[in-house]
């Protein structure tokens, strides 16, 4: 990648990724969802204008990406897990080989700000979600998404469960047309290692102290520690990793 073509990288904010633990923080996440949807998906903005049941039920984890200098929340995502996920998706006839899997439901990824800031925040949120799934022994993350937004998730290894032209209209997404995507988290590291390159380095070799969801695990000696979150290469690394994952479809499929 030609670094001369990403002048915004050095201006990217320093971020913190943490879990929303207070009502105020959850409401900040809701506000970011609404702003992001209103900018790009105006027809869906009303769906996310208020706090939802899944913000307080089905073992929710709401992640926030916060500007470390201004404390402004610029991105958010949510993971629900546990037995309630199957009940929540009861309208969908899941493949029989999912029967023994512990499932997570990933939703409400939203980001605001500059394109570079949003890309970096989404990347760190994806990494944090994967770490949480591994810690909670979630075998698969499931995602209901429309065709347009699916392009945000396929580079990270999410693949459609059903044929791409199969549309679902479950009540959980207000009956809107979507497809079901999945990421097999239990095999993510092995497959990323097979692929190699920036994806494996970013997800499994680089220690990001911006991700504060596991503060008790403050030191992981076997992995590369990059503690200077102000270093301009941080933004460049994120963009390189994203570009590497956005290759031809066969390469993306090799992630799983």
Image (cartoon, rainbow, N blue to C red):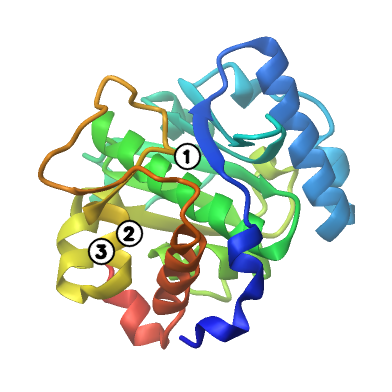
Q: Earlier in the sequence, mark 1 or mark 2?
A: 1
Task: Identify the residue under disc 1.
Answer: 105
Q: Position of residue 176 (x, y in %)?
A: 74, 53
Please, what secondary structure does the residue beneath circle 2 have? helix
Q: CA distance from mark 1 to mark 3?
A: 23 Å
Task: Identify the residue under disc 3.
Answer: 200
Q: Quadrant of the C terminus?
A: bottom left
Q: CA distance from mark 2 to mark 3?
A: 5 Å
Q: Earlier in the sequence, mark 1 or mark 3?
A: 1
Q: Is residue 203 left or right of residue 107?
A: left
Task: Identify the residue under disc 2.
Answer: 202
- Identify the residue at horizontal 62%, vertical 49% (top origin): 13
Q: Is residue 239 left or right of residue 137?
A: right
- C-beta proximity under 8 Å, tags 1 and 3: no
Q: CA distance from mark 1 to mark 2?
A: 23 Å
Q: Nearer the viewer, residue 204 or 134?
A: 204
- Identify the residue at horizontal 49%, vertical 45% (top origin): 125
Mark 3: few, some, or many residues within 10 Å (few <14, many ≥20)? some
- C-beta proximity under 8 Å, tags 2 and 3: yes
Q: Nearer the viewer, residue 115 or 152?
A: 115
**Residue reaching furthest left?**
222
Please, what secondary structure does the residue beneath circle 1 have? strand
Q: Quadrant of residue 9?
A: bottom right
Q: Is residue 166 left or right of residue 113?
A: left
- Identify the residue at horizontal 78%, vertical 49% (top origin): 36
Whether 36 is drawn above or below 73: the answer is below
């Amino acid at each position: 990648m030609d670094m001369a073509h990403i002048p915004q990288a050095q201006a990217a904010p320093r971020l913190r990724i943490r879990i929303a633990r207070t009502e105020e923080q959850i409401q900040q996440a809701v506000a970011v969802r609404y702003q992001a949807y209103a900018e790009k998906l105006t027809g869906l903005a009303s769906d996310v204008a208020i706090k939802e049941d899944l913000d307080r039920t089905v073992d929710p984890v709401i992640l926030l990406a916060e500007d470390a200098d201004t404390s402004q929340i610029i991105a958010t995502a949510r993971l629900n897990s546990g037995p309630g996920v199957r009940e929540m998706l009861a309208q969908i006839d899941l493949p029989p080989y999912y029967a023994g899997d512990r499932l997570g439901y990933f939703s409400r990824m939203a980001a605001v700000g500059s394109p570079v800031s949003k890309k970096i925040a989404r990347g760190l949120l994806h990494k944090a979600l994967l770490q949480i799934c591994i810690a909670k022994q979630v075998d698969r993350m499931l995602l209901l998404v429309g065709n347009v937004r699916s392009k945000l998730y396929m580079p990270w290894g999410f693949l459609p469960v059903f044929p791409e032209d199969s549309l679902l209209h479950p009540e959980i997404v207000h009956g809107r047309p979507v497809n079901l995507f999945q990421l097999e988290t239990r095999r993510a590291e092995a497959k990323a290692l097979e692929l190699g390159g920036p994806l494996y380095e970013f997800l499994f070799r680089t220690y990001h102290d911006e991700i504060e969801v596991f503060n008790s695990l403050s030191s992981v000696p076997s992995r590369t520690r990059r503690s200077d979150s102000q270093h301009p290469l941080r933004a460049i690394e994120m963009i390189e990793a994203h570009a590497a994952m956005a290759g031809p479809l066969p390469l993306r499929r090799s992630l799983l």
